[in-house]
Image (cartoon, rainbow, N blue to C red):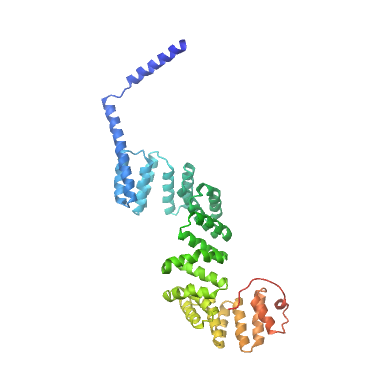
Amino acid sequence: MRRLCQLLVASAAAFILSGCHSPNHTEAKQLAEQRWNEVRAGVKLQLARQQYDSGLFDDVVRTVSESIALDSTRPEAFVLLARSNLELSKPASAEQAIEAARRSGLDSADLHYMRGVLLEQRNDFTAAVAEYAQARMMNADNVDYFVAQAECLVVLDRPEEALALLDENMHRFDDNGTVAVLAGRVAALLGDWDGAAKRLGQAAVILSDNPIVAEELGLLFVRAGRCEEAVALLRPLIEAARESESAAVRHGIATCYLTLGDPTSAKTVLIDYARLHHEDGPAQLLLAKAALETNDLLTAARAADLAEQLAPGRGDTALVRAAVQWRRTDYAAAADTLYTLLEKEPTNVEAYCLLAEVLRAQSQNDSARDCLERALRINPSCIWARHALVSLGNSDDPVALSSHSGTTSGHP
């Protein structure tokens, strides 16, 4: 009973005290005005978001500034002001907006993210990484913060750290292909082609209708030597885009067809494209190789000449030109091209092997044998040189006659 009386007395005292502090007319008016300003600020902020989505960035700056003047307690208003100023190429004004929020004691994940963006634009990547990391600590489920931090780590030459971060958090964004794409790119940067293909393969499943991912994965397969998979991904892209596709796609498909021993398909992929794109040196060189292997010497010579004009002095172009000259029985020109090439690239095994073929065609067997032996000293596993040397007969070079196996470039 005594306890109940104490509670009643305490409640009555609290009621009396609160009554004593009831707002007077002036205070009530100020509170009402403050609440009305907060409502107006919210309406203006919503309008500013709509203007931002419509690309009306000057209007956004004006509207969101009015919102902040009415209510300066919303971090998102300062973030929107900063973003709009960045869109208007006014980074100083954007930074002023973020600093104003910080001086007001405001804090949010988006504020740290925007601060990171501004630091990154000033090339202060170390500080930017710290801001992105803080944003992630406050909101670990925002993929933009995560991707920005990983990209900054790569710029700071810390790709291993970036890849570890991406792999550790991949499950958090397993329905977002952006993370898998970035992880694939970083793995490729580190030379882990299989790992890159695996990660980009995950992205391709998520983004199955995205041609950009298909292209990137297909080109990665080209670099990894997984040519059948590369062709399967890239061929539909050129069939759908016709002449508007990336040149790299066409290069990749042609390279794979040549690797797979199908020069006819490589030539088909390139012939019309190369005719319309004389300026594409890599395409001209690939066409020259494909045409040479299909014995279309006229096309091979024309494409090799174009490739030489676009990139003078390239060894692979000179090798193709020499092969065309050899096939045309212009042995003197072929030998001259190869001797010039070997002066620049004295360890070019294919050049020695082709020169041996040219010399052999002129019955200069001793000189041909010398070229092949030089090739084998540079690369003992060169199949072309070993077989050619055996076919010359009377070889005393045990390396040439050994059964040592290995990979090598093929016959032109």
Q: Quadrant of residue 189?
A: bottom right
Q: Nearer the viewer, residue 328 or 369?
A: 328
Compared to residue 43, the image places residue 165 above or below, namely below
Residue 137 image point, x, y percent: 49, 43
Residue 25 image point, x, y percent: 26, 25
The answer to whether residue 96 is seen in the rendering is: no
Query: Residue shown at 47%/65% (left/top)?
Result: 236
Q: Nearer the viewer, residue 210 or 127?
A: 210
Q: Nearer the viewer, residue 203 or 303?
A: 203
Compared to residue 124, the image places residue 228 above or below, namely below
Q: Quadrant of residue 331?
A: bottom right
| Extreme-top residue of the structure | 1
Q: Nearer the viewer, residue 188 or 208?
A: 208
Residue 359 image point, x, y percent: 61, 86
| Extreme-bottom residue of the structure | 363
Query: Residue shown at 32%/38% (left/top)?
Result: 71
The answer to whether residue 35 is seen in the rendering is: yes
Q: Quadrant of the C terminus?
A: bottom right
Numbered marks: total: 0
